[in-house]
Image (spheres, grey):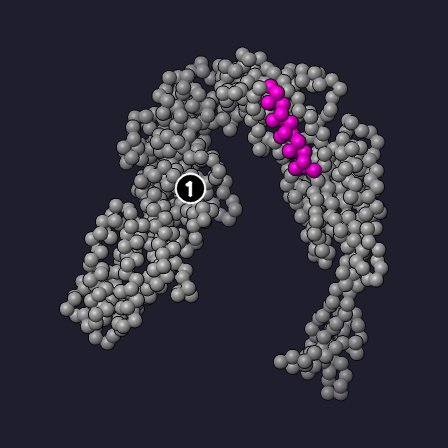
């Protein structure tokens, strides 16, 4: 033990837990490791243990966690339970009532062992005790088993005649506290201090001297890099170095790197080559074949073109690396041959010849085939193209071809190549460059971190496709609920917004949604969901702006007016953000809130125009003059969408507005004076509302 229990010192040492299994699912390994460590830590903390330093380990045949300097015993815990009041605890003869006897029995003590506690509400009987902490070795088995039960495993399995269930058969369990083995049974396996090394490099068990030696002994004796991050970095660096020796650079996809890390315990990079003739196939298809089927890292030359070479990660340090190289080269050849066959076979007909096949491909049962969807998208895209003065002929052509590649052999084999292969087939068919590129860009952005389409035709196609899906799915009553979003409508809505804002496309969502709904009229009553779709799309902007550092109250001030042009919405956000930082913002935000309350209180929908002859104070006259002086310039700025300039001018109203509220009674008894003052405030308020509802800004003056 690292510390002795002398003079009431807390005994601490390292706790090691390792679950040894058959090869774990590679795509789930990292998440299983994180969940297992978290479960063990949570269980220990619930039991009262202080957990400071934790190391997690995950390799193909093991999940492990090392908790450093963990106390040997659970801390003592003070127990205090409040019982019945003194009034109901004893009868008239001073004997304990049934209520008191029952409470004492539930506490495991006699009535005379209870304490009295005086409170503001009277006297009560309480039970107080100190529960001695249990040893860690007596608690840890239950904690580990509970953590294993809670792992995110969709389908568990049994093996042999064992009753235990886990994601893979369990062959060994290591459970050590310091240098001592903690006796336990985990998933039907008794614990020990013996782990197992690499499946091929070692045969004898690795006997651990103490928990802290786990990582080092596995590496030096067992040929296992147990630390996931260390192993991943080793693989990445080996790939980079090997690629450099071959005069190129490797394509290192993060998800592939993580999967390869989960497949290997002792990773060794091996380079291979393939016939240069396969380079006639589009690089995307070859790369996908190498990554998805073989888990290889493709190589690019110094000008960014695909090389006829690859790097694979072997899970063994072979004495004959040339044989490993030759084996991988032999395996990749039929895969590349398939890709070449698909590429050549698909080109035996032009891309638009695949369109009739889309009639039989169902998009959604109630919304028709993919061909039906394509026709709707084409009509919607043409409408948007007219608004943006784009080339409608090319837009319609791109829309017509947009889903044709779904019926090709190549996309049938590699679904993730949809769009990319459409572009390649369009290029070889002689389609205009803008049309071909749009076939790939229609799917952009594919995720939150992906770029939006770079071309106008691609942007129009991207917006149209997503909008048709949104309106259609809402119309059939399958809008997202909670975390369920099977049609990825959140991503679709955000993609529409990002495309409009980032490329400054001045489009109005409402007529676009109405157009999409009208195109669906022969199948569903989509007109009934137009408002719901608009609100849903607009609400996606909240996360978009908050992620970019925009304050929540700034967003609330703008969204309160529901601007339907995303580009216009963005201009307002920027303007209100600048305005909020001005020294005048606090006062004017508070004033707008006050004016809003007054207008509600006045209950007048039309107060008429302001009559200067009814002014009684200089404060009224001054505010009126200031409003008149800036009115035309402010309106002009608003009309051209320059909200920042308009709000900056309006910030000059701070002093006259403050003076007005300090010296004028708006809701006076004289109806004419009252209405005239309300009309003056309504004029001012209306100008601010051209940008946002500034009363929603959180200022100290508003509390």
Q: Dividing the picture into quarters, in which one does residue 204 lie?
A: top right
In the depicted view, which residue is nearer to us: 92 or 687?
687
Range drawn in magenta: 227-246
In this orientation, does residue 88 appear? no
Residue on which disc 1 sits: 493
Outermost residue, bottom side: 93
Which of the two residues, 135 or 160, is positioned nearer the viewer here? Answer: 135
- State the image coordinates of residue 121 (x, y, percent, origin top left): 62, 80
Q: Which is the main secondary structure of the residues drawn in magenta?
A: helix
Q: Give the quarter of the figure containing the C terminus.
A: bottom left
- x and y percentages locating residue 687 in the rendered image: 26, 56
- Residue at (41%, 43%) from the top-left corner? 474
- Residue 559 is inside the magenta segment: no
Position of 13 relative to 94 (above/below): above
Determine whether, in the image, residue 385 is placed left or right of residue 221: left
Q: Is residue 609 above or below residue 31?
A: below
Crowd tier of the residue under label 1, counting other residues whose Cα lies within 10 Å: few below 14, some 14–19, many 20 or above: many
| Residue 394 visible, this angle | yes
In the rendered view, would you say 385 is above or below 212? above
Query: Would you say 679 lies left or right of 314 here?
Result: left
Q: Name the image quarter holding residue 663.
A: bottom left
Choose top left, top right, bottom left or bottom right for residue 46.
bottom right
Number of marks present in the image shown:
1
Residue 232 lies in the magenta stretch = yes
Position of residue 549 measured from the top left corner of the image (x, y, whole percent): 45, 49
Question: At numbered mark 1, what does the secondary structure look like: helix, strand or loop?
Answer: helix
């Amino acid at each position: 033990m690292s510390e002795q229990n002398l003079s009431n010192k807390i005994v601490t040492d390292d706790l090691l837990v390792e679950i040894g299994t058959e090869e774990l699912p590679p795509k789930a390994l990292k998440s299983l490791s994180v969940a297992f460590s978290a479960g063990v830590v949570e269980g220990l903390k619930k039991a009262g243990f202080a957990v400071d330093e934790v190391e997690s380990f995950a390799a193909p045949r093991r999940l492990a966690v090392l908790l450093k300097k963990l106390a040997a015993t659970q801390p003592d815990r003070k127990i205090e339970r409040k019982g019945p009041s003194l009034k109901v605890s004893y009868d008239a003869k001073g004997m304990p009532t049934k209520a008191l006897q029952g409470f004492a029995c539930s506490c495991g003590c006699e009535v005379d062992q209870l304490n009295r506690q005086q409170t503001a509400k009277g006297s009560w009987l309480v039970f107080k005790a100190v529960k001695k902490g249990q040893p860690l070795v007596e608690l840890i088995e239950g904690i580990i088993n509970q953590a294993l039960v809670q792992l995110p495993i969709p389908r568990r399995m049994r093996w042999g005649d064992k009753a235990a269930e886990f994601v893979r058969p369990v062959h060994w369990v290591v459970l050590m506290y310091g240098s001592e083995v903690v006796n336990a049974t985990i998933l039907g396996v008794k614990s020990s201090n013996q782990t197992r090394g690499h499946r091929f490099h070692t045969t004898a068990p690795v006997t651990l001297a103490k928990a802290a030696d786990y990582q080092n002994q596995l590496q030096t004796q067992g040929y296992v890099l147990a630390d996931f991050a260390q192993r991943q970095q080793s693989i990445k660096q080996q790939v980079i170095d090997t690629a450099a020796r071959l005069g190129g650079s490797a394509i290192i996809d993060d998800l592939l790197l993580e999967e390869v890390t989960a497949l290997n315990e002792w990773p060794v990079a091996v380079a291979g080559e393939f016939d240069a003739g396969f380079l006639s196939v589009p690089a995307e298809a070859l790369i996908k074949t190498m990554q998805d089927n073989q888990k290889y890292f493709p190589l690019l030359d110094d000008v960014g073109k695909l090389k006829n070479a690859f790097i694979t990660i072997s899970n063994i340090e072979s004495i004959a690396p040339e044989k490993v190289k030759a084996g991988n080269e032999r395996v990749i050849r039929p895969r590349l041959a398939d890709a070449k066959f698909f590429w050549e076979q698909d080109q035996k007909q032009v891309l638009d010849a695949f369109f009739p096949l889309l009639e039989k491909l169902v998009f959604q049962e109630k919304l028709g085939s993919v061909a039906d969807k394509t026709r709707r998208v084409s009509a919607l895209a043409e409408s948007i193209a007219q608004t943006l003065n784009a080339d409608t002929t090319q837009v319609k052509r791109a829309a017509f071809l947009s889903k044709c590649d779904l019926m090709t052999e190549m996309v049938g084999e590699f679904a993730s190549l949809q769009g990319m292969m459409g572009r390649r087939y369009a290029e070889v068919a002689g389609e205009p460059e803008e049309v071909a590129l749009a076939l790939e860009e229609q799917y952009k952005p594919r995720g939150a971190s992906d770029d939006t389409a770079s071309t106008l035709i691609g942007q129009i196609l991207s917006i149209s496709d997503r909008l048709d899906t949104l309106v259609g799915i809402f119309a059939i009553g399958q809008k997202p609920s909670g975390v369920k979003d099977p049609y990825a409508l959140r991503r679709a809505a955000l993609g529409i917004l990002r495309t409009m804002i980032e490329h400054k496309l001045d489009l109005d969502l409402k007529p676009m949604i109405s157009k999409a709904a009208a195109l669906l009229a022969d199948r569903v009553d989509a007109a009934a969901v137009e408002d719901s779709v608009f609100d849903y799309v607009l609400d996606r902007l909240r996360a978009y702006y908050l992620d970019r550092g925009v304050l929540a109250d700034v967003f609330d001030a703008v969204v309160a007016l529901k601007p339907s042009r995303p580009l216009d919405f963005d201009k307002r956000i920027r303007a209100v953000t600048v305005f909020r930082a001005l020294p005048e913002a606090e006062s004017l935000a508070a004033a707008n809130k006050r004016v809003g309350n007054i207008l509600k209180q006045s209950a007048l929908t039309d107060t008429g125009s302001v009559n200067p002859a009814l002014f009684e104070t200089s404060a009224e006259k001054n505010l009126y003059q200031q409003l008149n002086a800036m009115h035309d310039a402010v309106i002009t700025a608003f009309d051209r969408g320059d909200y920042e300039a308009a709000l900056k001018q309006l910030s000059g109203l701070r002093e006259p507005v403050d003076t007005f509220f300090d010296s004028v009674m708006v809701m006076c008894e004289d109806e004419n004076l009252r209405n005239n003052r309300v009309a003056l405030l309504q004029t001012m308020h209306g100008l601010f509302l051209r940008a946002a509802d500034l009363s929603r800004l959180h200022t100290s003056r508003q509390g």
